[in-house]
Image: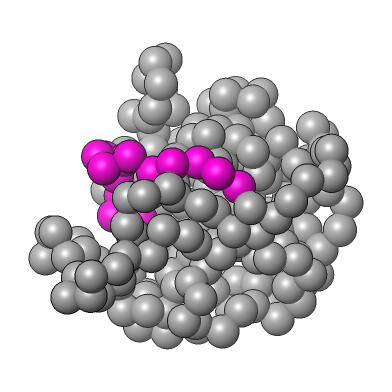
Amino acid sequence: MKPYWEENGISIYHGDCLDIAPELTADCMVTDPPYGMKFQSGWKKSSRVAGDQTTTARDKALGLWGDKPAFVFGRWSVPRPAGTRMLLIWNKGDWPGMGDLKSPWGPSTEEIYVIGRGFIGKRSGQIIHDPKRPNGNSFHPTEKPQGLMRKLIESCPPHWVIIDPFMGSGSTLVACRDLGRKCIGIEMEAKYCDIAIKRLEWKGAA
């Protein structure tokens, strides 16, 4: 299967991950899938996430992946994936994230589900502090910061190949590039594949 783009150990495939991922080989999944919360940006009415009506896409992808190592982002109001062994909490700081804009409170955390074994690193608490900036979503409505993604990937042995079947704008891939890791990204929206390529080809901070 020919990738949409490939360079220096990083490859991008355009299409449905349920069709593409079974043809590829990787060691750890690091992904921010559709949460199943019918996401709609409160600031940009046109900003939606494909497949976010239910957790079907997430659960099918994880079903194909099995019990191999994975970091999977999620939300408290949606059932956790089967096989979750540990729950990490991303603390965004004081900047509120996705939620009901009519409420006086906005969620300042997100969940990260740990599946499988084989991770490395010094033992620490389950809360990862990485403040989210007000203008942090430059490329995708649910974009994750690079500091956070690097912390997750650094918990994987260096020889592991990372795969992100819901690549979005490529934050996982950019973090892998910066850490010298091999990574595969899959994305069904061509516009995000192209954004990810620009981020990967730009030599500055992406």
Q: How many marks?
A: 0
Q: Position of residue 206 (x, y in %)?
A: 39, 27
Q: Using the image as rendered, state which of residue 120 and residue 28 is in the foreground.
A: 120
Residue 192 seen anywhere in this rendered image of the structure: no
* Front one among 21 and 81: 81
Magenta highlight on residue 137 = yes
Question: In the rendered image, which quarter is residue 58 located in?
Answer: bottom right
- Queried whether the magenta region covers residue 73, the answer comes back as no
**Residue depicted at 51% across the width and 52% down the height:** 91
**105 or 33, nearer to the observer:** 105
The image quarter containing residue 193 is top left
Q: Position of residue 59 (x, y in %)?
A: 59, 79
Residue 28 relative to residue 18: left or right: right
Relative to residue 180, is residue 188 drawn left or right?
Answer: left
Q: Would residue 111 be visible to someone looking at this image?
A: yes
Q: Residue at (21%, 64%) from the top-left corner? A: 41
- Residue 62 lies, in percent from the top left, at 65, 72
Q: Residue at x 11, y 65 (%)?
A: 45
Q: Which residues are magenta?
A: 128-142
Compared with residue 61, is residue 4 higher up or lower down, i.e. above or below? above
